[in-house]
Amino acid sequence: MNINTQAGIGHEAQRAAQEHAPSGQGGDRDQRGREDGEDFQSLYEESFQDIREGNIITGEVVKIEKGIVFVDIGYKSEGEVSLSEFRDSEGNITVKQGDRVEVVLVRKTNEKGYPVLSRSRIGDVRRRKTIEEAFHKGRPVRGKIISPVKGGYTVDIGLRAFLPGSQVDIFPSRGPGEWTGTEHEFRILSYDRKDDNIVVSRKALLEKERERQRAETLKQIQEGAILKGVIKRIMDYGLLVDLGAVLGLVHITNASWGKTRNLAKSFKAGDEVSVKVLSFTPDKERISLGMKQLLPDPWPEIEKKYPVGAKVEAPVVAVKKYGAFVELEEGVEALIPTTGLSGTRRIVHPSQAVNVGDMVEAVVTGVDSEKRQISLSIKDLYPKPESD
């Protein structure tokens, strides 16, 4: 069948459909007319198939011989499909002469002049069409990160795609091995059908969601508000906390009522924390947060808990040139001056008497709740020698 005759076939099919349309005389005749009309309408529509390489086309099986299925797709001559493509998992043939089947036009002409068709490539064509539509309409696609490659990762989204390393996450924190095997949604950044070149991004979707979260979070931020957040980064001077696409800072002095010397020992990135908004500057989006403000301040009642003369036992948490600090309880530290570290010998440096982690017994020698200071003495545990 010559391609130039397709329009003629279409018109003939249309006229035939009109001639066989229901006349209104008799129910059986009306029914037959509708059925014939539908058949011819189907034939009419199929006569305008887009016969291009790579497209899915419907045709009729005209014969099967010598392991070849010949399919009429309305082109110059019947196309050929290997019979093996029409066998089920048990090897049974699933097609016969007269069946209408879907095939992919691989090439319009082979060395014999026949169109080359494929049944097995239908899935690939449909996946490409789905991906192409997702690209043009901006719809996300789901895929699995298969393996790291130079500059990024290979991703399976139905077809192989490339995920640049810079497009994996907003805050890259994992190593390449940790991403392998994980499933995510991606946005298709570029799609070249001819070369099967597909580039995807996870970061683009995260940024879009982050903007939505950002707007929601900013509505909730006001001085005094208590929020949940996730620690993103630990620095010497404080904690950077993600409140939901908005970052705030917990200064080291607001992390605990006590003296926090090493935040990394007490916190780690990824920890979920509760924080209180201490101040918020909307124009600069500067947010000051506090964690200790959610806990009772132990110092107002400290003189009652640790009166002068009381004996205490506590671990050494820091050793300085002028003395050793011990932690009486969370948020409460006390200083043992160098001169009070021993009642039996002269101490030049505190390290001569104690080390960090040592449990020591001492007596309270002074308390100043306003200055948040407590002084202790080990020397005063021992009775003073009698003078002659």
Image (cartoon, grey):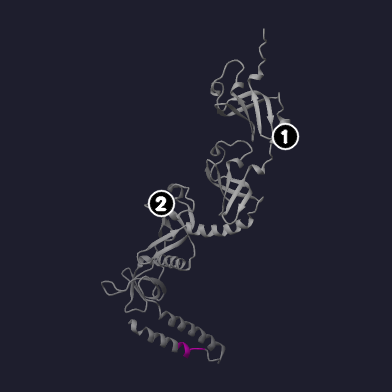
Disc 2 residue crowd, few under 14, some 14–19, many 20+, Cα 10 Å: some
Question: Could you say which disc has been placed on residue 379 in the image?
Answer: none
- Please give the residue where the numbered disc 2 appears in the rendered image: 147
Question: Could you say which disc has been placed on residue 301 in the image?
Answer: 1
- Looking at the rendering, which quadrant does residue 364 occupy? top right
**Badge 2 element:** strand
- Looking at the rendering, which quadrant does residue 158 occupy? bottom left
Query: Would residue 264 be found to the left or right of residue 159 on screen?
Result: right
Report x, y in % for residue 15: 44, 89
**Badge 1 element:** helix
> Which residue is farthest right?
304
Question: How many numbered discs sit on the rendered protein?
Answer: 2
Report x, y in % for residue 153: 41, 53
- Looking at the rendering, which quadrant does residue 261 occupy? top right
Which residues make up the magenta segment? Answer: 16-21
Instruction: Inspect the magenta stretch and tell me whether residue 116 lies in it.
Output: no
Q: Is residue 153 above or below residue 340?
A: below
Q: CA distance from mark 2 to mark 1?
A: 59 Å
> Which residue is farthest top?
388
Disc 1 residue crowd, few under 14, some 14–19, many 20+, Cα 10 Å: few
Instruction: Name the amino acid, label 1.
Output: Glu
Query: Would residue 329 be found to the left or right of residue 34 on screen?
Result: right
